[in-house]
Image (tube, rainbow, N blue to C red):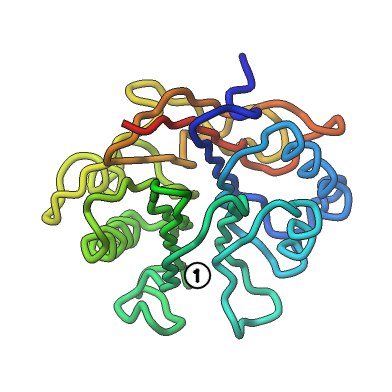
Amino acid sequence: MEKICKNQPAFSVMTVNIRFGLADDGPNNWIYRKNRFASLFQIHKVDFIAMQEVNNFQKDYFQEILQDYNFIGKRTPAPSNWQDNIIFYKNSWECIHEEHFFLSDTPSVPSRLPKSIWPRQCVIGIFKNNDRSIILVNTHFDFEPSVQLKSAQIIIEKLSHLPRDIPVLLMGDFNAEPGSPCYNEFTAKNKWGIILKDIFPGKFSCTHHAFTGTCKGGHIDWLLYCGSINSKNREIIKDKFKGAYPSDHFPVCGLFEWL
């Protein structure tokens, strides 16, 4: 398949759960696989990269290799083993608005929903390039379906307070498949009337593979959008880099055009 995210016009995005760097993954430990990310980003030079499960030392590494990018999403202060949702963006874009909140009943303070295993969070940025603006959302959901549904409602409610004339891209690891309650909340009907579309309408491939390259489970890393943009092309990147996979999730990449 054509590398649709390589040096293309319009604008391009990628979402990837990078797998936190403190995990004991043997031959796929962070020290062995971080250079695979360098190869990935050399080939797929997108405008925006939404990363989940980013430890602080991983963020530092990405800052070193992504020298043409700025970023948002780092929680400060944070525990030493904290995992952030980071959005790296090319420095041809300007971030004019940023929000960081928790997917809980008290979003402004570190917290979790009662049935959530971990404190989950979301990062929203509004980015501008000349006369074009885009709202990007990066998140990582917990596992319980009722928690996922409530998390989706929290995000949509946040979006309802932002300008409705700016296109929205929602990216992340949702730990849920298309057709799940949270997916339907984003794509079918909600009380705020913010309905997003999937870049893979009607056809899905799994994205979590546990470093094997063989699909396990369904399509849980999504890229959803709405507004005056159109999905021009899309790709689930299943290639190896430096002979192995950079993460236990396949990156999801999309190319968009302005309407």
Q: Position of residue 18 (x, y in %)?
A: 66, 50
95 to 107, vertically: above or below: above
Residue at the left extreme of this rendering: 191
240 to 110, vertically: above or below: above
Quadrant for the C terminus in the image: top left
Residue 246 left/right relative to 179: right
Residue matched to label 1: 118
Residue 152 left/right relative to 78: left
State the residue in front, 209 or 4. 4
Image point 48% across, 72% down: which residue? 119
At label 1, counting other C-alpha atoms closer than 10 Å, the crowd grade (few under 14, some 14-19, many 20 or more) is: few
State the residue in front, 11 or 50. 11
Residue at the front extreme of this rendering: 130
219 to 185, vertically: above or below: above
Residue 22: quarter of image: bottom right
27 to 40, vertically: above or below: below
Residue 30 left/right relative to 51: right
Residue 83 left/right relative to 119: right
Find numbered disc 1 in the image and state the secondary structure of the residue it sits on.
loop
Q: Amino acid at mark 1?
A: Trp
State the residue in front, 75 or 147. 75
Q: Position of residue 177 (x, y in %)?
A: 39, 39
